[in-house]
Image (spheres, helix red, strand yellow):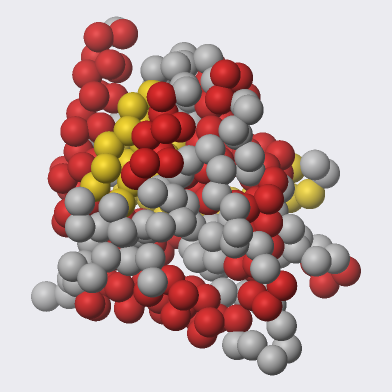
Amino acid sequence: MVRLDPIVGRFAYIPYAGTDYRVYFEEAGQGIPLVCLHTAGADCREWRHQLCDSDITRDFRVLAFDLPRHGKSIPPDRWWKEEYRLTAKFYADFVMAFCRTLELQKPVIMGSSMGGNICLHLAARFAEELRALIAVEGCEYSPGGFIDWWWHPHVHGGEVAAAAMLDIMAPQSPENYRWETCWYYAQGGPGVFKGDLYFYSVDHDFRERCGEISGKAPLYFLTGEYDFACTPELAEATAKKIKNAEATAMREIGHFPMSENPALFKRYLMPVLEKILRAGSAAR
């Protein structure tokens, strides 16, 4: 008997700033929309375990999409005419354009790494449209990642990026999942990882802006103890500056909880999802 994942993959045309972006996304489940954002240089495959978890998809419609230039989402027209640099404005606006195009009502946004950092921008600008945000490996400032040799003719960008990602995963995480995460990075398009890191390390700086977040949409920080790019201490310090925010340190896990150790990540994620469900029930 053939085994099939419950995931359905589709393409949607997302209009933004006069361009229709052909975007690939995967989804599974029903209930509250839960939009998952991948890390820098990767794609939505990172969320395959959560998409296949019936404990999650019983109450949540889980959707994960590839940003333009990532995975199966092609770049915009004439992409070769300029160096790719992801900005906070484009990223936040595009996440909301995706949600609006798919007519997602009060979604939860869960992003990891750069996807965690953009949660602060979304919370500041779009709290009225969101139910909650889960910033995985996110904090107010993550400097140091934007360096020229991530994209250089003498460097195999994919292999270098993949090898570097091993450094920020926990040694306790299953070996096959750690290497699977590296595989995603080895397949990235030229200049994409570096361009993402422009947002992650340069255009994202919330150190003086946490007061802009109203707290109307609760913000949950989940941070692995082996992540030196965004430590639990940095996430906790950020949460203390934000209304209606809380931070949890995750033991024996690194920068890619959802893909490097999905079983352990689930132990930390489910209590957060249960809080969101209870808040929704109380509001009815």
Can residue 173 be spotted in the picture? yes
In this rendering, position of residue 250 left or right of residue 187: left
| Image quadrant where one finds the N terminus | bottom left
Q: Quadrant of residue 138?
A: top left
Q: Nearer the viewer, residue 10 or 125?
A: 125
Residue 24 in sight here:
no
* Residue sitting nearer the eye, 192 or 94: 192
Q: How many marks?
A: 0
Please tell me which residue lies in front, 169 or 1. 169
Note whether 21 is above or below 242 in the view shown. below
What is the residue that sits farthest to the left in this orientation?
Answer: 1
Residue found at x 59% / y 33%: 207
Return the x and y of residue 36 as percentages of the image width and height: 42, 46
Left or right: 235 as drawn, with respect to 280: right
* In the image, residue 161 above or below residue 29: below
User: Relative to residue 274, is residue 9 drawn left or right?
Assistant: right
The quadrant in which the C terminus is found is: top left
- Residue 60 drawn at (x, y percent): 29, 36
Residue for point 46% across, 75% down: 164
Residue at the image point whose x is 53% and y is 33% from the top: 120
Side (left or right) of 67 relative to 220: right
Quick one: which residue is furthest to the right in this view? 81
Give x and y (percent) for residue 248. 27, 37
Q: Position of residue 173 (x, y in %)?
A: 21, 67
Q: Residue at x 66, y 62 (%)?
A: 146
